[in-house]
Amino acid sequence: MTQGAKQFFLQNKSLLEQDSLDELYEAAVRSKFVSVSDVTDALLEAGIDPMLQVSKIYDLMYYTVYAIPLDITIPDKIDFIGIQAFMNTPIHHIDCNKVDFISPQAFHKCLELEKIEIPNVERIEEGAFYRTAVREITFRDGPCVVEEGAFTACNSLQTINITKYTNISSGAFTDCSGVEKINFNGTKHEFYESHVGPAFRRDWYSQLTKVGAKIICTDGAFGDD
């Protein structure tokens, strides 16, 4: 633990004794002595899992924290993941559980992150999963906005599962050269109406088909007519 962290914890000792660690993290956000990730590092070193005692994942909470568990399930009470919250960590698997909002660069450059579960996520912000090792993505069967660059440079990505409610920005999958299949839970006509039609004019799908991806609908491959 750094000298700054020791001073911070001494000054905020009473906050460690509370049922929630939210006030401790709020104090870290304002502190001149430590970063939010320094607090997380110190808590993990002391055998405390901070994720179990907060109401949200704070900005930079696990940023470059290498002692982080490699397999994570976000607790039920948490529905928000902050900016760069897990950036540059060695995690392998994240189950976002009840989370509905993932902030910019939340998992940016998590180079070993192979599996993500986002069953309730309604919005994925810019660069959230940039350059991860994710192999397959399944978006929720309900409205979900996927912003520009959300999955840029995910070179291991092979399969994307979407519905008519998945609102994908044009550059969401830039430089994802390994995508083989886009599974759409609907007909070819429904795919056209929801992802290609003149009201949208999005071209994320054309970028992926240019590198060999097939759009598989319930009645066949889109574009084979």
Image (cartoon, rainbow, N blue to C red):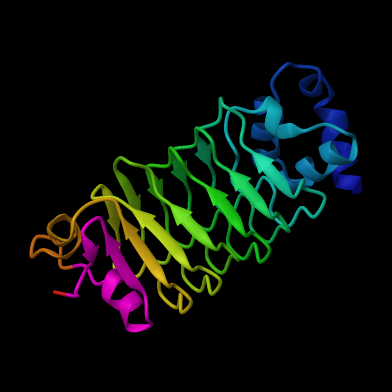
Left or right of 77 in this view: 142: left
- Residue 197 in the image: state x and y as whole percent: 11, 63
Residue 141 magenta-drawn? no
- Residue 78 in the image: state x and y as whole percent: 55, 30
Residue at (56, 69) in percent of width and height: 131
Residue at (38, 43) in percent of width and height: 140
Position of residue 105 relative to residue 181, above or below, is above
- Residue 96 in the image: state x and y as whole percent: 55, 41
Left or right of 191 in this view: 182: right
- Boundaries of the magenta span: 202-224
Taking depth in this image into account, of 41 and 199 the one nearest to the observer is 199
Left or right of 134 in this view: 170: left
Q: Give the number of marks.
A: 0
Taking depth in this image into account, of 30 and 69 the one nearest to the observer is 69
Q: Is residue 148 visible to us here?
A: no
Residue at (23, 51) in percent of width and height: 186
Q: Is residue 77 visible to us here?
A: yes
Taking depth in this image into account, of 140 and 15 the one nearest to the observer is 140
- Residue 25 in the image: state x and y as whole percent: 68, 34
Residue 204 magenta-drawn? yes
